[in-house]
Image: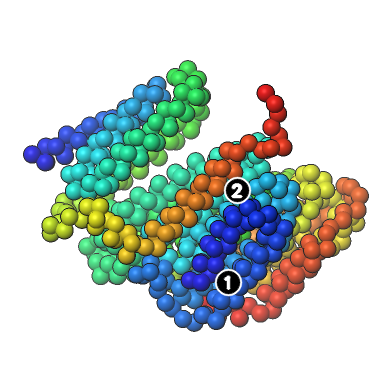
Amino acid sequence: MTLYLFYFLSFLAILSALMVVFSKNPVHSVLYLIITFFCIFGHYLLMNAQFVAFVHIIVYAGAIMVLFLYVLMLLNLNSESEPHKNNTLKFVAVISGCLLMVVLVAALRGTDTMMLQDNGSKIGYVRNLGKVMLTDFLLPFEITSILLLAAMVGAVMIGKKSSKTTTPQ
Amino acid sequence: MNALYIVCGLGLTALVAELFNARKILSILVILGLAAAIGLTIPELGTSISYFTNMVLIDNFSMAFSILIMAVTILWFWMAQDYFNQDLEHYTDRASLVLFTVAGGILMVSFNNMAILFLGIEVLSLSLYTLAGSKRDSLASNEAAFKYFLMGSFATGFLLLGIALVYGATRSFDVQGIAASVVIGSATLPAFFYVGVLLILVGLAFKISAVPFHFWAPDVYSGSPTSVTAFMSTVVKIAAVAAFVKVFSVCFAEIAPSWSFVLKIIMILTLAVPNLIAAAQDNVKRMLAYSSVGHVGYILLAFLAQPESSASAIFYYLCAYSVASITAFAVLLQVEKSNSGTDIVHFNGLFKRNPLLAVGLTIALLSLAGIPPLAGFFAKYLVFIQAIERGMISLTILAIVTSLMGAYYYFRVIIAMFLQEPAGDTLTVSASQKILIVILVAAMFALAVLPDYLLELI
């Protein structure tokens, strides 16, 4: 049963990921991306990683995608306003992208299926994750706070209106 | 480890300083704090302790590079007074972002776990994207920030995929763990492990701006505010190169044949391409950007020759390179301020306008070109010795030829400064900048006289 589910989710994920790239309308791209995220959510659940799965939905499909949609609506992007790309660049990009895919597929094709070694450890549970985060991975956890702080300071710095240059509208 | 605490603490202090109206003393506070961090690190040299369940390893390698990063940051803060004073509104924000960048750099030189490497790179890059765009009314600065952000995120994607594949093959994020499974199982490692190694190579080659992953560098370097460019081409470069050296010399030294060929091509391109393009530049800032890409080529040559034992030569090269770069940028900033431009014509007759600046820039450029008896010469000499010891004669000849090309474009600036008619009135420089340039010039000679002390650090 889970095997069929796995194949179904993988098929859907790859299909909608391709549609993200190929659809002309940016809003459709975003919607297909949401489908991809939900498929990956299913994969996380299959791997018994509930916490990551739900964070994935809340953060990516929820927050970030809504942000994308807003940006698209604000910029009023549509298929006509898409800038025309250089043909040579397109050619080079397609060649190098395909080469990377060939290398990745060739490298992954010959590998044995590695089974998840889950000795009933319930490894993906929030409780275990929290424990690991505050013991083994304490330093990365704290550094992440510095990272977020730096991002926040940067966003405020770029986004804040300068008091000198503001002109009455 | 104390250094990391102090730098993070200083970053937070800088943010809070805005509340207490402590802008005026902030620069001095930061310089004193960084000096204290260096002072606390020096007595620990010679020890090797890992912290936080093996997340970071503070050994001589990491301490030497941390000290270098912090020392260059002190010089940078001294140099970049104008950058902070021009726009008082975001004074403290920018100071804190610079300090977070330094914290990221320290993590990148002392990581012992791939998670820390990734976080270090991200802390460093995210702060830097904002700093690149910190001149908000300038279109070039905005473009630089956006380009750097997009390209940087893309490169981080490659790095992450590489780390994930390596983790899949070795089941370890730990640097020593990966190295151990590479040594034990080099015959049985799956094919995707090597793909992972190459993807990590791509991600890190972007960060050290090696050709052909350098396309962002000239635009970002010339679009950013000049002070930020100076920071990027010194502090950030030191951290990125050290992280590169550490990943490939500790984790993947055992399987060097699988990546050394790719790295060799990258190195040859990095030596040849930027030096050729730099010769055609009329803007000194852009020329320095290309030359900073070119210098990575020499570092890669030393690393490729002896992956396990080139750290001290690379350290010395980076010391010589960053002192000379900071000097060049300090002069560039003064010229930019008085002529509002950085083309070669703006340097015409600088010797008549301000002899100290002209002599300082000349010595810096001669050091970058590798003319004896300056530090840059000994740095290049050590690199070439490393390569010749391993029989890489043809590559060494290529490197010598490209450094001659380098001399050509450095001399264009020097000739403009001494032989052309002045491009403006006498250029006055504040006393603190004069002292800084004198100290930097003295440092270039001191590094040349005492290379042994630095070489023994690692």
Pointer 1 chain:
B
Which residue is drawn at the image coordinates 36% and 23% (left, top)? Answer: A28
Marks 1 and 2: in contact by CB < 8 Å? no
- Amino acid bearing label 1: Ala
As measured in the structure, the alpha-carbon distance from the residue carrying label 2 to the one carrying label 1 is 23 Å
B147 horizontally vs B32: left or right: left
Q: Residue furthest left?
A: A1
Q: Quadrant of residue B385?
A: bottom right
Q: Looking at the picture, does residue B124 appear above or below residue B87?
A: below
What percent of the width, then of the height, locates residue B117? 42, 59
Is B170 or A147 nearer to us in this picture? A147
Q: Nearer the viewer, mark 2 or mark 1?
A: 1
What percent of the width, then of the height, locates residue B22? 68, 57
Is B361 or B15 nearer to us in this picture? B15
Is tag 2's residue or tag 1's residue first in the polypeptide sequence?
Answer: 1
What percent of the width, then of the height, locates residue B28? 69, 64
Which residue is drawn at the image coordinates 38% and 33% (left, top)? Answer: A65
Is A130 or B375 nearer to us in this picture? A130
Which residue is drawn at the image coordinates 51% and 24% (left, top)? Answer: A75
- What residue did someone put label 1 on? B37
B353 horizontally vs B245: left or right: right
Q: Residues within 10 Å of mark 1 (few under 14, many from 20)?
A: many
Residue B190 is at least partly visible in this image: no
